[in-house]
């Protein structure tokens, strides 16, 4: 048996096991156990059925970060006031995380109602948006000293009126460390509804077999003493906090009698971005939950590996499986041909809803396969260094660019840079010799430049160019603009600048990811501060965008020689950013810039 056949069989078994054997078994167990519990519930003398004066009412703090939630906050506050739980044992902790809408004002108007109900309401208002996880750490650290249990709930979700009493009954068991619940959607597509029905059944089965693998942000509750702050780059806090409970030797339990209902529907675009974040978080938690396999809790290990573990890596498995079966089909293997056809049909059917063609089958396939696609993109973005700030409510700086544009732009950068290097590489030794012959010093010139600006940092890199000035030209003058007939420029340097051949080594910067082929001109750090002070929106030129070897500003205006030149270029740079809103606009703009750059090089109109 060849290696290809062994891999194909192994991957086939993994795919069938995860989707058909494990998932089907867990859904079946969840449904049947749930039905049996409902049948016996009315005759049982459970903790929930004892008289109120005998019930267990520990102090509970409900923590809730909020960012621009004016659409949902009133419904949420009303929901909290109606909770069936002793008011003196309940406190609510809310942090307005850099809200710029009416959220804080609305909360302030409800303080009297909470006071009248006897429920302590603690509100923190902060103008800085630090992200959900940072606020959870802050709120839980303050609330844990006053309460035995801490509940977490999203502003956009309503919870069962008896949710806290139900949870308190579960915590009578000293081994219970956290409780999670059913997650429902007020408005759901067919695929979403099916998915969460299955997930609720799976979590119910997990709870009876070992531990629930995580919770959901709509509502979960844990013992305050088990809280340990999570790293602020944590993406899926509602998974990692329950997992820290398991790490400390306690159980995470699913209570099917508690419902949380998500009020806010998501459109296709927002759902795609949300599932990218979840995919990135799944990969992060797979790495950080390695501790599970150090415990001899074999059922929990099996649940994690078979469920979350395989679900996380499944997009990579499916991608490799399609490539492997295609390769074997190319070799004329009949089974592989059938597998390729089957996969192709499934993927094509999943695309039909994008064309407005809907059915129960296509909608479900679109949701599940689309979820894997979004998850794959999220994991690739995580591996590429994104999501380092965890989950923030504010959109990323690069949000003005579509995901497809970003992927196509980076792909074209790599391909065209490789082609450009291969075509021009024979010139490099000749140009280096001419530079060395014309003036003393190295052939290449390195200079620190400002690159892409992200949410948390401004990237710096060393740009590589052929040297066009005399060695140490700026030792006396410092960083200054070039001028007409600049005496610092060498004879060969004038030719290199006129033809733009001095930029050729920047292909290396593009391949490294420091630069793009097309974008704003990279500026020196020592000049950026003065330019930003003098010119509004100067630094925003490279917000979420790598600087380029050439660009719209460069081909329409030469090198900067004064402040007015830079002022004019800002408009060109922002005009280029606008073109990144769709792949077609970007393609048209880049073709225009490339052809104009070639014209400038051939006609020697560079400066």
Image (spheres, grey):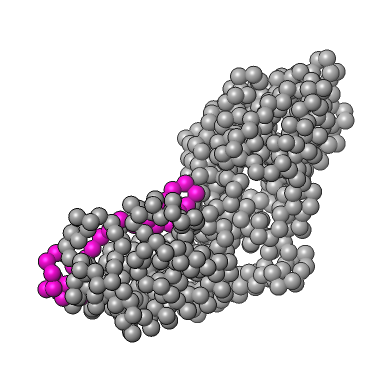
Residue visible at 77% across and 58% down in the picture = 190
Residue lying farthest top? Answer: 53
Picture coordinates of residue 308, whole percent (x, y): 58, 47
Total number of numbered discs in the rendering: 0
Q: Quadrant of residue 476?
A: bottom left
Picture coordinates of residue 501, whole percent (x, y): 28, 75
In the image, taking residue 110 as reference, residue 498 lies left or right, namely left
Q: Is residue 455 magenta?
A: yes
Identify the magenta region: 431-460
Picture coordinates of residue 103, whole percent (x, y): 71, 39
Screen quadrant of the N terminus = bottom left
Q: As displayed, is residue 23 above or below residue 83?
A: below
Residue visible at 39% across and 52% down in the picture = 530
Residue visible at 60% across and 28% down in the picture = 140
Q: As displayed, is residue 601 above or below residue 130?
A: below
Of 232 and 50, nearer the camera is 232
Of 168 and 49, nearer the camera is 168
Q: As displayed, is residue 337 above or below residue 379?
A: below
Picture coordinates of residue 392, whole percent (x, y): 57, 45
């Amino acid at each position: 048996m060849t290696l290809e056949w062994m891999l194909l069989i192994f991957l086939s078994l993994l795919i069938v096991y995860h989707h058909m054997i494990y998932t089907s078994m867990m859904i079946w167990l969840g449904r049947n156990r749930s039905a049996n519990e409902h049948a016996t519930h009315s005759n049982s003398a459970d903790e929930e059925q004892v008289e109120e004066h005998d019930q267990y009412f520990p102090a509970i703090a409900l923590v809730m970060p909020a960012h621009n939630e004016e659409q949902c906050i009133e419904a949420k506050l009303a929901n909290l006031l109606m909770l069936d739980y002793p008011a003196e044992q309940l406190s609510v902790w809310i942090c307005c995380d850099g809200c710029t809408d009416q959220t804080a004002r609305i909360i302030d108007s409800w303080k009297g109602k909470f006071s009248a109900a006897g429920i302590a309401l603690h509100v923190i208002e902060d103008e800085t948006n630090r992200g959900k996880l940072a606020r959870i750490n802050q709120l839980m650290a303050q609330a844990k000293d006053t309460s035995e249990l801490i509940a977490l709930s999203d502003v956009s979700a309503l919870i069962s009126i008896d949710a806290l009493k139900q949870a308190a009954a579960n915590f009578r068991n000293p081994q219970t460390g956290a409780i999670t619940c059913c997650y429902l959607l007020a408005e759901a597509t067919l695929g979403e509804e099916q998915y969460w029905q299955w997930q609720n059944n799976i979590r119910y089965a997990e709870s009876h077999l070992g531990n629930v693998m995580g919770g959901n942000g709509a509502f979960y509750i844990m013992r305050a003493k088990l809280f340990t702050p999570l790293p602020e780059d944590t993406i899926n806090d509602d998974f990692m906090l329950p997992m820290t409970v398991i790490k400390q030797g306690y159980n995470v339990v699913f209570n099917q009698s508690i419902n949380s209902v998500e009020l806010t529907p998501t459109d296709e675009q927002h759902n795609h971005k949300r599932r990218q974040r979840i995919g990135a978080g799944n990969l992060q938690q797979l790495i950080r939950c390695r501790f599970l396999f150090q415990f001899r809790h074999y059922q929990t290990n099996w649940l994690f590996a078979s469920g979350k573990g395989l679900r996380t890596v499944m997009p990579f498995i499916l991608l490799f499986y399609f490539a492997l079966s295609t390769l074997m089909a190319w070799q004329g293997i009949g089974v592989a041909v059938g597998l390729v056809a089957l996969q192709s049909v499934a993927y094509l059917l999943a695309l039909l809803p994008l064309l407005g063609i809907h059915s129960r089958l296509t909608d479900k396939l679109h949701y599940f396969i689309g979820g894997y696609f979004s998850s794959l993109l999220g994991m690739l973005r995580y591996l590429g260094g994104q999501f380092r700030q965890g989950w923030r409510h504010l959109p990323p700086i690069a949000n003005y660019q579509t995901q497809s544009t970003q992927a196509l732009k980076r792909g074209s950068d790599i391909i065209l840079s490789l082609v450009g290097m291969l075509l021009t590489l024979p010139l490099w030794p000749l140009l280096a010799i001419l530079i060395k012959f014309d003036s003393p010093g190295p052939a290449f010139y390195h200079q620190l430049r400002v690159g892409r600006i992200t949410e948390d940092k401004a990237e710096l890199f060393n740009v590589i160019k052929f040297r066009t000035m005399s060695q140490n030209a700026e030792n006396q003058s410092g960083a200054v603009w070039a001028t007409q007939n600049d005496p610092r420029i060498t004879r060969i340097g004038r030719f290199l600048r006129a033809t733009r051949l001095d930029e050729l080594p920047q292909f290396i910067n593009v391949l490294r990811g420091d630069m793009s082929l097309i974008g704003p001109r990279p500026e020196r750090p020592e000049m950026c501060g003065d330019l930003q002070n003098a010119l509004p929106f100067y630094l925003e030129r490279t917000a979420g965008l790598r600087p380029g070897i050439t660009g719209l500003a460069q081909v329409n205006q030469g090198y900067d020689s004064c402040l007015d030149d830079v002022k004019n270029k800002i408009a060109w740079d922002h005009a280029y950013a606008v073109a990144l809103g769709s792949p077609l606009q970007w393609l048209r703009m880049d073709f225009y810039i490339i052809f104009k750059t070639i014209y400038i090089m051939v006609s020697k109109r560079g400066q």
